[in-house]
Image: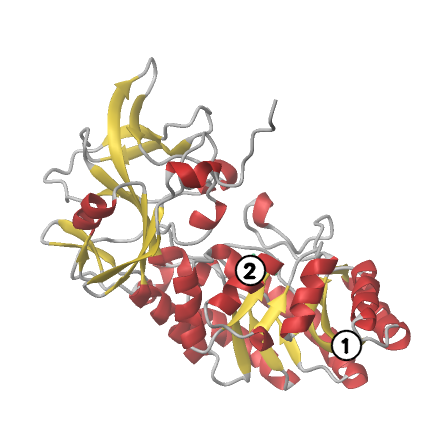
Amino acid sequence: MHSFRYIQNRLHCESTDLESLAQKHGTPLYVYSKETITSHFTRLDGALNEVDHLICYAVKANSNLAVLHTIAKLGGGFDIVSGGELFRVLKAGGSASKCTFAGVGKTRGEIEFALHEGIYSFNAESESELRHLNQIAGDLGKKAPVALRVNPNVDAGTHAKITTGKKENKFGVEFERVIDAYAAVAQDCPHLEIRGVQMHIGSQLTSIDPFVQAVQKVAPLVEQLKEKHQLQFFSIGGGIGIVYRESLDSGDPSWWGDKPESDRPLTIGAYASALVPLLAPLKLRILLEPGRFMVGNAGALLTKVLHLKQGGAKKFVIVDAGMNDLIRPTLYEGWHQIAPLNKPATNTLEKVDVVGPICETGDFLAQDRELPPVHEGDTLAVLSAGAYGFTMASNYNTRPMPAEILVDGTKAHVVRERQTLDDLIRGEHIPSD
Ligand SMILES: *Cc1c(COP(=O)(O)O)cnc(C)c1O
């Protein structure tokens, strides 16, 4: 679902006209819908109400303070992967007691910070990390709450770069070693407190089967560990896929969940009804770590057409947003719908590559894409760019990072200012000759 649609032939986010935002704030510009984030959260939350649960939003998908604040106000927790993300959560009004800390390489500084703030759980990814956590907690005279990330060796059936639950991936502890690892913690790590079991098999899963396979495989293990180690929770990770192709016509139901089953890869209804019966008998707190699902459809990147260029073999639409603003197309072969802000009057389509200004052949937003005729000066919306968009943006080619706007009905808040030229060199020094 999302809140982007044409109203009187002009693309809107909720009730806000996007062309007016582009004119006022410039491009490239990220625009997020508060309504979409809120409805995704409440829909997922509601679908799980038969089990004790906590939604820990994966901050790395979109870490803007206003986004985190929105989720904190809804009662959400957070899944963090760095001390920096914990800092953001705290600044946004979130609580460390609802945070889980994932990642294969946490530093001493990050662990101390999280322990000091009272993190809910360190989701450890190796036995060596457990010993490290035990040591640091001991040094501080504290107990570190921990869960172990299990690698269930299940193929998520998604892009290779976002598959995390196979045994050749760097994530988690090998399924067969998990029981021994928990026993070792209980025996040798007096400064650790076992709280749970965690897994996360990959991202942008568009079928329920891998989730079911993984839960079916790990649930008996959780049952066994629960008896021995007084577990509080089982986290089934994130990974819920979203629809990247949406109708933008007003009057069309904005919920993709309202479309026929055959037109949607994975609905929240299907997700919950397949998993809740497997999870409820565990009688544990179930944690979820959705990132993309919560914010992906909630964001669009607005970009202006600078030039049209006929190459030897292809027609290029050169826009002012590049791979430094949105890297998904080139990094993950991510497909983003691209729509002009003014609805085209004709149905004619033309095959083009939409490319950015960066000096890299991999700098494209779309390849061989059928688009309505576009003109220099038009503004385009690159849709469903709310997850892994701005958070993966960089200053490559010394380009300032775009501004971010949070729309709430007719209101548009600047939630991050566009970087200035001075921002680009902040902290740099030239040694005196
Ligand atoms: C990235 C990540 C997530 C979120 O994945 P999505 O596909 O965005 O839902 C959840 N848990 C962990 C441990 C992650 O690394």
Secondary structure beneath dot 2 equals helix
* Residue 207 versus residue 92 in the image, above or below: above
Label 2 sits on what residue type? Answer: Glu
170 in relation to 318, above or below? below
Name the residue at 73% across, 52% down.
167
Task: State which tag comes first along the sequence, 1 or 2.
Answer: 2
The answer to which quarter of the image holds residue 44 is bottom left
User: Where does residue 409 sit, x and y in percent of width and height?
Assistant: 21, 66
Hey, which quadrant is residue 81 in on the image?
A: bottom right
Outermost residue to the front: 432
Amino acid type, residue under disc 1 in the picture: Lys
Q: Secondary structure at mark 1?
A: loop
C-beta proximity under 8 Å, tags 1 and 2: no
Residue extending farthest to the right is 188
Mark 1 closeness class: few <14, some 14–19, many ≥20 residues within 10 Å: some
Q: Which residue is mark 1?
A: 142
Circle 2 is placed at which residue position?
85
Of the residues tagged 1 and 2, which is closer to the observer? Answer: 1
